[in-house]
């Protein structure tokens, strides 16, 4: 607990509220399988979109739009794009790695009850350019923050979300144009599949393990990495924290 | 409430835990002022870094490192970079807009007790390339998810965080190299300032307002925007949700 907080009770979190935030962060997983064939209630979907809409955005630009996709026809077209991108991606692996790669479940486009396409409009005028002149990609980062908000809120609602990253942006942008209305200027499109799921993982753990956090912490300068000093940050960490 | 959840009690969130997640999301603000001159306890900093480290990352790549910066000398150099970038940024505004822009508090580099530099290493081999061949920038998005995790956890700890986006990446990368060790391959550097703060806002509301969420929701296709149908998603939303 932080004991020297100046905030009023109204501002500070109860133990249970704080635990909820860390649970959502630690228990969030990338879900692409075992979605149940149950619809997501409208008001829950509304809460998730509202959570996304409250992400930070550079200059309060709010560059996102949300396309809620239930149409099987559209999802089939997106799935075809995935199959092609994944076929190309698999080619860099050989032997056992290839077999392992091909056994991974990397999307849930058709299996999930809802897909969500989150766009990023770089040309939106809201925000008057504040904060995005030094690094124009900050507008993309704002959209990513919206996605992470939605992902954590979904965990709190016991819903599974998967981010499908194996999609060539070009055919996806063409597809978006084919369905009319997204001009070429709105290039950036991210896709999530989500639904009610009993699963908690995606299987990537078979391929890769969590890095030790103490190896990733530096003090003041890049060359001042000190694992022992870093470990001291975690001495009081409760047991529900994950492996360091 | 979602009533048709298949999960066991162990998996689902209590009302208070769920409220904590939404509170963190709705009450998070970008804080750059009124930091109190109190240090952040080590174990709280540890929890925040652990939250960041549990972000999703493409192929479980975990491309981030965390530089915890308390040195005044280094913060002064970064602040000089901000002043130069901000001087250039201000030039696009004239008249009242210029005066308004110059009244905004856009960084807390020197005022906050801790700065955090979060790097993104595109060359890290963890993850074996899974998921990042179609869009190499997914590695950046992973780092942004880590930042958003930390930001929300900080809210739960009653700590204020500000993301300083008005920094030209080039001098910042040079500065990182001058402090030795960050090679050219680690180009992407984001900076946060954070500390204990009584403030809840940054003042951007004077410049820009929140967009209506119902205007940003589309159904199946970009050209199928339906504000009335979108509004139905929010009919059951509790009053603590923000303006639609």
Image (cartoon, coloured by chain):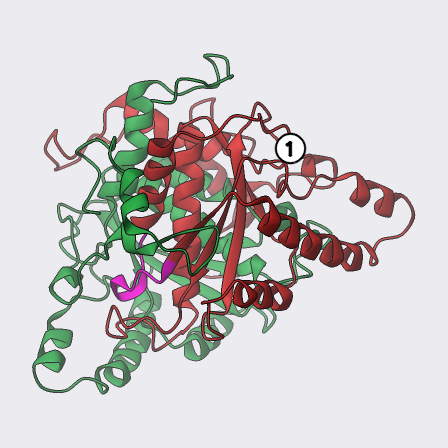
Chain colours: A red, B green
Q: Nearer the viewer, residue B132 or A50?
A: A50
What residue sits 62% from the left and 69% below the top? A170
Residue A63 drawn in magenta: yes
Q: Nearer the viewer, residue A23 or A234?
A: A23
Question: Would you say B201 lies left or right of B216 here?
Answer: left
* Region of the chain picked out in magenta, as a range: A55-64
Residue B102 image position (x, y, % from top left): 13, 76
Above or below, comparing residue B238 to residue B228 in the picture: above
Residue B72 image position (x, y, % from top left): 29, 63
Above or below, comparing residue A131 to residue A7 in the picture: below
Q: Magenta-highlighted stretch: main secondary structure? A: loop
Residue B85 image position (x, y, % from top left): 31, 80
What residue sits 56% from the left and 66% below the top? A178
Residue B195 image position (x, y, % from top left): 25, 48
Residue lying at the far top of the rendered structure: B9
- Tell me the element at label 1: loop
Q: Nearer the viewer, residue B117 or B56?
A: B56
Residue B145 drawn in magenta: no
Task: Name the quadrant containing residue B163.
Answer: bottom left
Residue B181 seen by the camera: no
Q: Nearer the viewer, residue A101 or A3?
A: A101
Q: Residues within 10 Å of mark 1 (few under 14, many from 20)?
A: many
Question: Would you say A175 lies left or right of B38 here?
Answer: right
> What residue did someone put label 1 on?
A33
**Circle 1 marks a residue in which chain?**
A
Question: Would you say A164 lies left or right of B103 here?
Answer: right
Which image quarter is the N terminus of chain B in? top left
What residue sits 26% from the left and 72% below the top? A130
Residue lying at the far right of the rendered structure: A95
Residue A158 seen by the camera: yes
């Amino acid at each position: 607990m932080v004991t020297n907080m100046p905030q009023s009770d109204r501002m500070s979190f109860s133990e249970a509220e704080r635990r909820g935030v860390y649970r959502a962060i630690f228990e969030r997983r990338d879900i692409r399988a075992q979605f149940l064939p149950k619809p997501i209630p409208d008001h829950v979907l509304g809460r998730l979109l509202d959570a996304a809409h409250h992400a930070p955005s550079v200059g309060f630009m709010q560059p996102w739009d949300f396309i809620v996709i239930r149409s099987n026809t559209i999802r089939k077209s997106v799935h075809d794009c995935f199959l092609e991108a994944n076929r190309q991606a698999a080619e860099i692996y050989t032997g056992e790695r290839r077999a392992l790669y091909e056994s991974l479940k990397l999307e849930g486009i058709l299996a999930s009850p809802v897909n969500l396409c989150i766009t990023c409009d770089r040309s939106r005028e809201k925000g008057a350019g504040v904060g995005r002149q030094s690094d124009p990609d900050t507008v993309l980062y704002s959209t990513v923050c919206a996605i992470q908000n939605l992902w954590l809120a979904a965990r709190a609602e016991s819903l599974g979300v998967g981010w499908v990253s194996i999609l060539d942006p070009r055919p996806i942008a063409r597809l978006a144009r084919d369905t009319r209305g997204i001009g070429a200027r709105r290039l950036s499109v991210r896709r999530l599949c989500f639904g009610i799921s009993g699963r908690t993982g995606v299987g990537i753990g078979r391929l890769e393990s969590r890095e030790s956090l103490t190896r990733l912490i530096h003090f003041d300068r890049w060359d001042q990495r000190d694992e022992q000093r870093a470990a001291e940050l975690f001495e009081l960490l409760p047991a529900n924290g994950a492996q360091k």
